[in-house]
Amino acid sequence: MADKHKNFIGGEWVKPTTGEYFENRNPAKQSDLIGLWPRSGRDDVDRAVEAARRGYETWRRTPAPERGALLKTVGDLLTARKDEIARAATREMGKTLQETRGDVQEGIDTAYYAATEGRRLFGHTVPSELRDKWAMSFRRPIGVCGLITPFNFPMAIPTWKMFPALLCGNSVIIKPAEDVPHTVTLLVEILEEAGIPRGVVNLVHGLGEEVGAAIVEHPGIPVISFTGSTETGRIVGRICGEMHKRLSLEMGGKNAQIVMPDADLDLALEGVLWGAFGTTGQRCTATSRLLLHEDIHDEFVDRLRKQAKGLKLGYGLDGDVEVGPLINEASREKVEQYVEIGQGEGDLALGGERATGRALKDGFFFEPTIFTDVQPGSRIATEEIFGPVLSVIRFGDVDEAFRINNEVKYGLSSSVYTRDVNVSFRALQELDNGITYVNAPTIGAEAHLPFGGVKQTGNGHREGGWEVYEFYSETKVGYLDYSGRLQRAQIDNYAGPGQEPEEAERL
Ligand code: UN1
């Protein structure tokens, strides 16, 4: 009988009130049952909110540097257990061990960044327009934050949300994707070991439409941070709008790598292989469009096809594997549907099938797939597939390439390979994305810089870096008047045209 895992509420590991559980299986080996996790319900969320409210009362009074020191300990514990956690993450998520090590490292980086932010959390002190008056802004926590995280970065994305929320003095309730409950369970164990006070961190496992919906709809949770599909994000956005909640959305992408004729083609080739097929294409930052200049198009496609064909698929814990499985059957079916659509929109140059070799038949594997001669406006060139499917588009000049890049509803990342400094700077200015890489693939965001996208990728907020601290705190302004008399802003210091201010007369 597989282990039954628990929720973490108010500092205790507790069973779900529903008494129900769901299975967590290895996507590379379906026969490998990792364990059973709680299929919680609304009552569990209610309990978590009560606990989180109590936790908030103590945590918000804890000095920010002390909150930071706890996150430093969390970073140290993650470092000590990096390999073990990465192995658990590969087992439940499927990407290679090298990638899950990177995923845990991103959590460590986020912890150490948060730790130092505890000694900053800057406000502003600015001159008042009146005499003997002081004006400044500072930051206050908001309350209980509901964090809903996806499967593709089972450690990094939960930490992107949780650590800044905690550093700012909030308490949190996290619901990880039901495909990857184990990694966040390990993270919460570490927070417990580091000494996080009761109720400050709460973990409620379950399904999106049950626990996720209960979190979004709960009136006791004023802040929601969601990473997932643009479709679900729209529903989350509507509810949060009606309830006046603060909301951060990180959603889809349709990211392009542009290769100019003057580029280092070896580098561009390495970049697109990693960008398109790393994480089996299951990144919001995955390269799903390759824009090739007509002068280098045929040669590049030829080389790309050969290299992509040679990628080794398999279980991510096996040494030389380069591409893991898709996360589940629904995701593989979605990829298959897009391949069918693609047959009518471009030429299938590689792949297009389930990968079913002997070591692969027990998992959700899909061959790296490339379509060439794809029209920029077609469905496979504009819709997010979240799988190992790359659409190749030919262009004639840089203006056309930039226009094609910008012609989709998403705007997360973009990449341009060129040796021309003018094209590089134009790309930064003109590509409608939250992130543009020059001579690097569309993936590779670092924890200490803002991460997020424009258009339907997001709703204007950023994760990572310094900006996320603004999302998890409320700005408050203080005015201190020590003049000993009533001073009226906008009135007493501007008496009107031709008239001296009263203050000036007095002096
Ligand atoms: C995501 O694509 O879902 O950009 C997040 C990267 C990562 C984060 C990606 N650090 O490579």
Image (cartoon, rainbow, N blue to C red):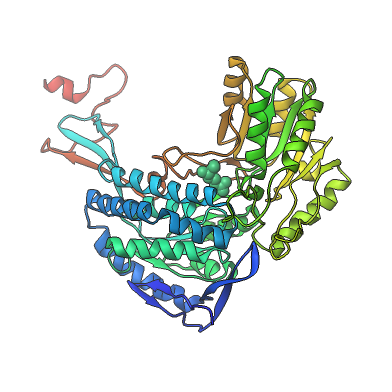
Q: Nearer the viewer, residue 282 or 352?
A: 352
Q: Residue at x 80, y 54 (%)?
A: 353
Residue furthest out toward the right: 344
Q: Quadrant of the C terminus?
A: top left
Q: Answer with the quadrant where ligand 1 appears in the image.
A: top right
Residue furthest out toward the bottom: 19
Q: Quadrant of the N terminus?
A: bottom right
Q: Position of residue 344 (x, y in %)?
A: 89, 46
Q: Residue at x 59, y 26 (%)?
A: 439
Up the image or down, 421 lies above or below 324; here it is: above
Q: Residue at x 37, y 54 (%)?
A: 78
Q: Position of residue 85 (x, y in %)?
A: 45, 58
Give the quarter of the image for residue 51: bottom left
Left or right of 255 on screen, residue 358: right
Q: Nearer the viewer, residue 53 or 257?
A: 257
Q: Position of residue 496 (x, y in %)?
A: 30, 23
In the rendered image, is residue 141 in sight? no
Up the image or down, 272 lies above or below 174; here it is: above
